[in-house]
Amino acid sequence: MELEFFTSGEEELRKIAEELKHKHGCIAVKLGTEVEDCSFEYIEWVNRLVSGLLPVVVKIGGPEARNDIRQLSRIGVGGLIAPMVESPYGLVKYVAALRDIIEPRQRQKMIKGINAETVNCYRRIDEILAMPEAKELNQVTVGRGDLSESIGKKVDDPEVMKMTAEITKKSQAAGLVVSVGGGITPANAKRLVEQVRPDKINSRHIVISVEDAGDVGESFRKALAFESAMMKYEAAGLSARIEGLQKRISTLEKRLVAA
């Protein structure tokens, strides 16, 4: 097995991830090729960064985003989430793509979920969960941000909370693990957990197990701090690359006007 080598900055990030895992119930890193706009190169870097510590779960570009599924399978991510599954047909297309592209042994080990994020999905969740293809799933993620926008409400509006709780209860009754995200803060995390009773909560990039979190508000605060640290590391690397490109451009422009 090839040994992994990390920079000092990467080692610091791994230490934070390890603390999150063992002290604060962190169970996955969540990325995406959809609204998160993560490149395959970035996903592969994060997957390497947290290798041996945490699985990387990626929200793909759509229920039938076959290129995403193929590339992410090659990278070896720990799970795939399909957004905008608003009907039984959307679930059928997603599961068909998984079965066509990922070999059974690898697929069996993966987290395979859908995002419940619109009022249409909420209205048809019973039909979706009743489909034979739902047996391929092991998770439902409730995206309160998009769900609330689909009915013109705020994420903590009582109607949105009621919808989130109903989707959670029905999904759990179908044997699926439920993660809830969207507008969660350290201040409202505990209230959300008490009202909705999900198995997990997630920020944009970090997934926390409710059972293992202890103080869920503090755990979520630590999760957001880790997100920030990852972004700062990425920004520093990007700044260095931009500076290098600017120097190269300057050199070329000088050569262009040289006598």
Image: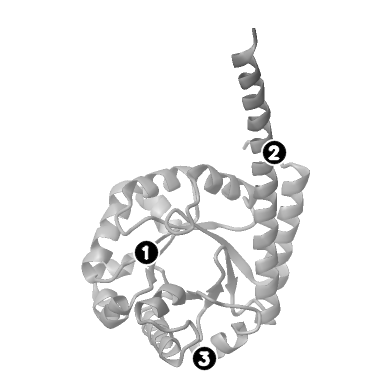
Q: Secondary structure at mark 3?
A: helix
Q: Is residue 83 left or right of residue 91?
A: right
| Image quarter of residue 170 | bottom left
Q: Looking at the image, is 150 positioned above or below residue 37? A: below
C-alpha span from label 1 to label 3: 24 Å
| Image quarter of residue 83 | bottom left
Picture quarter with the N terminus? top right
Q: Residue furthest top?
A: 259
Residue drawn 43% across the image and 47% down it: 73
Q: Amino acid at mark 3?
A: Gln
Q: Residue furthest left?
A: 89
| Image quarter of residue 207 | bottom right
Of label 2 and label 3, which has the lower sequence position?
Answer: 3
Image spot of residue 8 (x, y percent) = 78, 44
C-alpha span from label 2 to label 3: 45 Å
Picture quarter with the C terminus? top right
Q: How is the image coloured?
A: one colour
Residue on which disc 2 sits = 240
Of label 2 and label 1, which has the lower sequence position?
Answer: 1
Residue on which disc 1 sits = 83
Q: Amino acid at mark 1?
A: Pro
Image spot of residue 175 (x, y percent) = 39, 77
Residue drawn 44% across the image and 59% down it: 35
Residue drawn 33% across the image and 64% down it: 136
